[in-house]
Image (cartoon, rainbow, N blue to C red):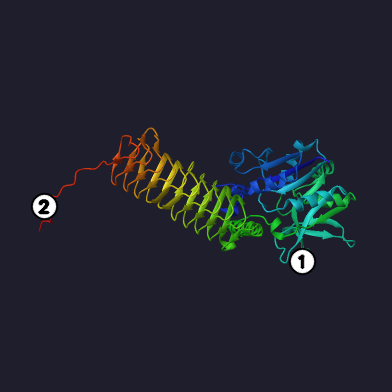
Amino acid sequence: MKTGIVILAAGQGKRMRSRQPKVLHPLAGQPLLAHVLTAARALNPARIVVVHGHGGEQVRAALTDADCIWVEQAEQRGTGHAVIQAMPTLTDLDRVLVLYGDVPLIAPETLRRLVALASTTPLAVLTAELTDPSGYGRILRDAAGQVVRIVEDKDATPDERSIREINTGFLVADRAHLASWLEQIDDHNAQGEYYLTDVIALAARDGVAVATTQPAALHEVAGVNDRVQLAELERIYQRQQAESLMRSGVTLADPTRFDLRGQLDAEPDVFIDINVIIAGRVRLAAGVRIGPNCVLTDCDIGAETEILANCVIESAQVGANARIGPFARLRPEARLADDTHVGNFVEIKKTQLGRGSKVNHLTYLGDAEVGAGVNVGAGTITCNYDGVNKSKTQIGDGAFIGSNTALVAPVTVGAGATIGAGSVITRDAPAEQLTVSRAKQMTLAGWQRPRKRQ
């Protein structure tokens, strides 16, 4: 059977107190709606339809690769009204699954279980048992335990409010039945809206058995209405990721102080200290050690390499047995070979660093190609930008660059060359030679510092 998924994402989210649509607020670095789309794709549906409303252009612009049909709900008149807007795009399908763009942690396994129920009845609903069900619609059952309707909290009687089984909003229905029921709902309720939940009573009236199932964990059906709830779900998500990593052989110094905002491929015996943020796609080979307060984005770190405290690594590649930091920054297209050392307050951008080379202190290397076994002294910079163009610096194998050297690109330092400390190199330095460029040192006898006039 062909299943279509409708994701309701039209709400403004006033309690977020934000200019940004609620479904674009990030959880683990991705919009809430992106998490729901990921869960939806896991079911391999025939079609995904996203119903947008408030800030619709922003939502579509942020998720241009969503591979879905976008439908506008120009006037927000309830969940039933929202699904009605999507139904014309689903006429060739067999059943419809309804999800919510602000409920990001729904598990694909739960959705598969819900959809499986639709093979036995035209309507299945996901419910949950809450200790405090305040604010949720209640599931009303008859004496035989069959679902007869759902009553919204604002419309419920005191006895109905005492019921602990609640409606999560998730349902799957035969498309033809759902289309018929949606034509019959009205807005005669406390909110003056068209409730999707009214189809349950219509199904019961038609003699349709309403199947139910429940999620494995309550956080799966927890929605985001304000920033407090968003932060609560962020911690739940991060704890899930931390536990998964630890079971795969990664050591986390403190799982509560770890943030994964992308995908981490980690081999056994990786160690990650506190307050580390992983973003984008990151690979950590076996035995890598990450010190505290590091941010790694879209990078590849080789086996047994150590990243010391407070490093920022973005779109870079580091080989095996390297040592980076503390306080180092590797910018995009930094490529460091095996056994390299990059020390404190060093910044490297669009540079290849050969095997065994060292850049240990207070240095900037940009648009450079550095050979193997090179030592770059403290305070060295490649002057790669003239205000208009970027130029390249090339340093041969085994060169020694003295401290406080400025290499004015384009320039080449030959293999085995030595550059004297404090030099400004504007022309190529030959291999195996000492090149020095300094002003003549002078001492002026009898000179005195200026003094403040009385």
| The quarter of the displayed image where residue 234 is located | bottom right
Tally of marks: 2
| SS assignment at label 2 | loop
Residue wearing tag 1: 162
Q: Is residue 73 left or right of residue 371?
A: right
The answer to whether the residues at label 1 and label 2 have Cβ atoms under 8 Å apart is no
Residue at coordinates 66% horizontally, 42% vertically from top-left? Answer: 52
Q: What amino acid is at disc 1?
A: Ser
Q: State the separation of the CA atoms marked 1 and 2.
A: 93 Å
Q: What amino acid is at disc 2?
A: Trp
Given residues 323 and 213, the one toward you in this image is 323
Residue wearing tag 2: 447
Viewport quadrant of the N terminus: top right
Residue at coordinates 42% horizontally, 47% vertically from top-left? Answer: 347
Of pointers 1 and 2, the one earlier in the residue sequence: 1
Eye-nearest disc, 1 or 2:
2
